[in-house]
Image (tube, helix red, strand yellow):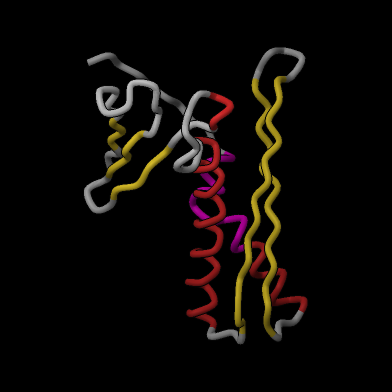
Amino acid sequence: MTIIADLDRTASPRGARTTLASARHTWYADLAASAGGEATAPEPHDLLDSALAACTTLTLELYLRRKDWNVSSLHVEVDRDERKGTDGVVEYTLARTIAIAGALSDEQRGQLLAVANRCPIHRVLEGRIAVRTTLA
């Protein structure tokens, strides 16, 4: 899938709101006001972190449907801690907390934790990521 990002600087020369699009959806990103944006949409780091939260929730939902377990709600929080290590490399830690409301045994809760740790975005973030850039 291709994601396209467009920033029309003629519409707002000092703005940073960026339109993001895939073949099926359109959404936005912006910078915080303190960084020179207008804070009209999530910042890029928020989008990255929200991918983990969404993927975790949806992966668990698919598993719950298959198992037909009695769960009334899922709540996933992702907090980030970003800093530079002594070697200058960015250390980006995502702390994920999952709250599950329902009558589940400890064994079932353990299974759900294992499933959450196998969600596709979790696997990508813990794997090797390469970014290759070309200038058109």
- x and y, in percent, of residue 125 in the image: 55, 40
Q: Residue 19 location, x and y as percent?
A: 31, 38
The structure residue drawn at horizontal position 38% and vertical position 34%, both measured from the top left corner, is 17
Q: Position of residue 85 (x, y in %)?
A: 74, 19
Q: Is residue 72 magenta?
A: no
Position of the N terminus, as image quadrant, is: top left
Where residue 79 sits in the image (x, y, percent)? 68, 46
What secondary structure is the stretch in magenta mostly built from?
A: helix
User: Which stretch is magenta?
Assistant: 115-126
20 or 17: nearer the eye?
A: 17
Looking at the picture, tell me which residue is in the foreground, 93 or 6.
6
Could you say which is closer to the camera, residue 107 or residue 50? 50
Q: Residue at x 49, y 42 (%)?
A: 42
Q: Quadrant of residue 89?
A: top right
How many numbered marks does the figure carry?
Answer: 0
Taking 127 as reference, is 26 left or right?
Answer: left
Q: Is residue 90 above or below residue 66?
A: above
- Locate the C terminus and report the quarter of the image it occupies: top left
Residue sitting at 48 percent across and 71 percent down? 62
Relative height, residue 74 to residue 18 (above, below): below
